Image: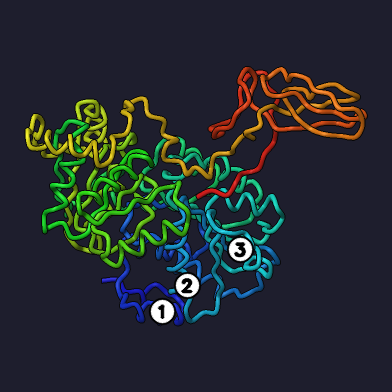
Amino acid sequence: MTQFTDLGLAKPILKALADKGYTQPTPIQAQAIPIVMQGRDLLGIAQTGTGKTAAFALPILHRLAEDRRAAPRRGFRCLVLSPTRELATQIADNFKAYAAHLGLSVATIFGGVKYGPQMRALAAGVDVVVATPGRLMDHLGEKSATLGGVEIFVLDEADQMLDLGFVVPIRKIASQLPKDRQNLFFSATMPGEIGKLAGELLKNPASVSITPQATTVERIEQSLIYIEAQRKRPLLAELLADRSVERSIVFTRTKRGADRVAKYLTAAGIEAASIHGDKTQGQRERALAAFKAGEVKALVATDIAARGIDVNDISHVFNYELPNVPEAYVHRIGRTARKGKDGVAISFCSDDERSLLKDIEKATRQKIPTFDRRNDKALAAAAAVADKLAPAEKYVDPRKADPRNNVPSELRRKRNRNGGGQGQGRGGQGGGQGGQGAGEGRQAQGQGRNGGRGGHGKGGAQAQGQGQRQGKPGGGGDFRGPKRGGVQQVETRWNPID
């Protein structure tokens, strides 16, 4: 049996592992650590819960400790990109624990918190930075971070990066990295776009694959219940009332749905909290802390939490709504049956979700045992009460649902609510494209061609304002993608994201 002592890791790292009671590496750790220590690029395919964080953290710390040098100002020697705040925090905590006797510095960079502490942490240089793509892009734009000193680049949970729309910023970040670097690429699945990204980033990589793609943990007892959509909440409350459910995660498809389910459970006397991309960092941390402390029996979450929560002893996972992406089912139920323990995964399926169920069973190559609770009179009566406690969310066909529902709202760039694009006014002419501005001289107003209010100009000064795409009147709203057609593109930087 392979031991950590057989892998050639530095003594301070072995001491840190012994402090945590770790003696034997997991399969991915045993295979990946020697490869990374050699300096080779690595493509790792492994599900959550297999110990892949240590598979790259331990050899990285060994390499940095063996070749000690100061990180450049506002720079770092190792960059780890993570899709969510929770996962970034979890990875950074592991790095800090393993580096306890090395004297190496570790910092996290993610949205939802103030820039000041992050800028101060980066100012003198850091050995390891764990970041989410959007906030890192902001620091790069503000020149408070530089990538010129990166020696090791790690992309973790690459397939979730794809789901959350991070591929474009990842490519932008990678284009600024030094060409002479080591690349480590980890993903639970390998869809076509992720395979293409891996081909762009990796140079003659070694491959480590621990489990077949989209398989589920054998220790998880899976089942599926056919139920009408409007009766899911009372059914969930009924199942959560069972004493065998000690600590559970409930997955919904949308953020508003997560809040409504949590509200209903609380009204029904079940301790519940919700967590999703629209919550502030403080709200998310408090909800997680209460869940870990056992104060909350059910944590209701969107898929953003499928791979960002590392909580022991989760007895049950409930798929209140089936995911749009079949691979997400594997990640969701992987929150239970961790560290050798057993777990239960129960999924709800309404008639409109049968196509999603078919995709899941095809991807996981299994037939999930099913039960039928449709036309249950007791649930029908409870559903009527449920609508009063927490009104049901407006139904959206899951086959037509926008996958961006699960993208943290902070990722979306936002238009100015005052309407209008950029416009100019000179000597009394209104702002072009609905812009609004002010100069010096005589005042004039005009109508912008995009439907916003025209600009003000005084004395021929230039007026400039923010606006909407052509043909739409003034007003705000989330920017959900690049403008298309003949409208002029306006360059903007990424806002703080999850």
144, 448: nearer the viewer = 448
Q: Classify mark 2: helix, strand or loop.
A: helix
Instruction: Place residue 49 in its image quadrant.
Output: bottom left
**Residue 33 against residue 183 in the figure, above or below:** below
Q: Which residue is mark 3?
A: 118
Percent of width and height locating residue 140: 67, 52
Q: Amino acid at mark 3?
A: Gln
**Which mark lies nearer to you, 2 or 3?**
3
- Label 1: few (<14), some (14–19) or many (≥20) C-alpha neighbours in 10 Å: some
Question: Measured from the top left, where is residue 278 in percent x and y?
Answer: 45, 46
Instruction: Please count the marks in the image.
Output: 3
Mark pair 1, 3: CA separation: 26 Å
- Asked which secondary structure carries label 1, the reply is helix
Answer with left or right where residue 455 lies relative to residue 481. Answer: right
Residue on which the image places disc 1? 16
Question: In whole angstroms, how far apart are the C-alphas of marks 1 and 2?
Answer: 10 Å
Label number found at residue 96 = 2
Q: Is residue 390 left or right of residue 348?
A: right
For image coordinates 49% across by 38% down, the residue present is 196
